[in-house]
Image (tube, rainbow, N blue to C red):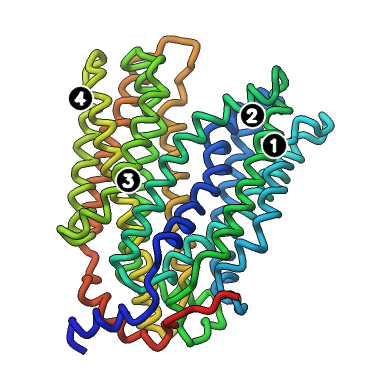
Amino acid sequence: MTPASDKDALHAYEPVRLGETISYGLGDVGFNMYWAPVSAFIMVYLGDVVGLSLTSIATLLVTMRLVSAFADPVFGAIADRTHTAYGRYRPWFLWLCLPLAAAGILFFSLANAPHDSKLFSAYFGLILLNLIYTGANTAYNALSGVITPDSTQREQIMSLRFGGAFLSAVLITWATPRLVTWAGRGNDALGWQFVMTVYGVIVVGILINLFLHTQERFALTSRPNPNPLRDVRDLFLNRPWVILFLLAGVVMVASMLHTSVAPFYMRSYAGRPDLVISIVMTFTLGLAAGSAVSSLLARVLSRQRWISIMLVVAGLACLGFFFCQPGQIILMFVLQAISGVAFGTIATLTFAMYADTADYNAWKTGYRATAMTYSMIMLSKKIGAAIAAAIIGWALVDYAGNKAPTPFVLDNIRLLTGLGPAIMAFAGVGIIALYDLSPERVIKLQAQLLGGIRGKTQNH
């Protein structure tokens, strides 16, 4: 086939309509109703409301991350081997929506547990919630690889998904504590239980809508590999995927170092604790803006080129924090917005590229392992997050919120917010330069996989 005929072949299926794109994008809004409260308020909830010690909470969070890291590839293997009349991935939204809502309500009802069993209940509740969330989210990520074989449409879908996800994260993070206060009327335990019950009902509706109004178009006729471990082996023999796997970990270290320490930077280095929330929100709004424009940018230059550019931009913006003087507040906010736009663009474009590497893997091996492709990328990100958390914990071991920071602590805060993320971002430029799966090659191999495309997927 010529390049033109390859492109024509990829249009021989029902395109993704706006309603379906919106339904898919809303999925991340639903997942954020658990991710945002847990990531932003879990220390406050477990410490102040449930009454656990900080040491117990820290150990619990480490345990949860370890369990989650191992759960990702397990759920990926299961999802890839699911065969139903509704597809491989969509049924999981129907199967897990009610358990996810129930687990969320259960975890945020811990304050009512007997005192002697609160720690055990916290382990059980959080790990259960995390496992169900991981299962549903694995299917959600994999769906992006089979909802369409068209790379351009994938970019547009990812742009809407991540733009909505980051905006909803801002809104949910802002609204949740206010809703808890309003609903609890002085009883935060009751407030959390009520809010997470409401969120659970909304999430059930979102996931059912996701099941009903999305399709799996790019389904290969070949059966999955009978051995899930061979899926993992095949991925690590897939050069483009390995590059993105490494990049995912490096970018996660960079972004987590910067975003996690930025509040300490504003509070202790800039001396403006009143601006901590504002600096966090500025970054998140930048993420949303970067996601929103990513599909437009990809029309001008290749995704690989834009990722390289944005890694440089992110590195320079983070480096600016290292050299900022404490009084340069406006400059800090400008740099924060720029870094958010850069990281948002990177996140959106790389997610679209994961689907391309899944297609390449199917073309190369004859086996489709879309869910495993995404699950192992998530594993890389969680490893990166764990590395960043360890670095922060070691570097800020002498930090005490009720005491003036020492010069050593202030230097480490500047390093973690600025120089460290910049080094990781610049390292990412070298990694993405090794990516060799060109857009033309993707179109060609996707056209050769057309035997697995169904022009109009049946909706049962």
Q: Nearer the viewer, mark 3 or mark 4?
A: 3
Q: Are marks 3 and 4 in contact (CB under 8 Å)?
A: no
Residue under circle 1?
108
- Dot 1: what SS? loop
Left or right? Give the position of 360 relative to 195: left
First in sequence: mark 1 or mark 2?
A: 2
Residue 60 lies, in percent from the top left, at 64, 39
- In the picture, the disc for residue 323 is 4
- Dot 3: what SS? helix
The mark tally for this picture is 4
First in sequence: mark 3 or mark 4?
A: 4
- Dot 4: what SS? helix
- Looking at the rendered structure, the kind of residue marked 2 is Tyr
Place residue 327 in its image quadrant.
top left
- Looking at the rendered structure, the kind of residue marked 1 is Phe
- Looking at the rendered structure, the kind of residue marked 3 is Gly
Residue at x-position 34% and y-position 53%: 159
Residue at x-position 42% and y-position 46%: 164
Q: Nearer the viewer, mark 3 or mark 2?
A: 3
Give the alpha-carbon distance from disc 3 to disc 4, as whole Å.
23 Å
Answer whether residue 374 is visible to the viewer in this image. Answer: yes
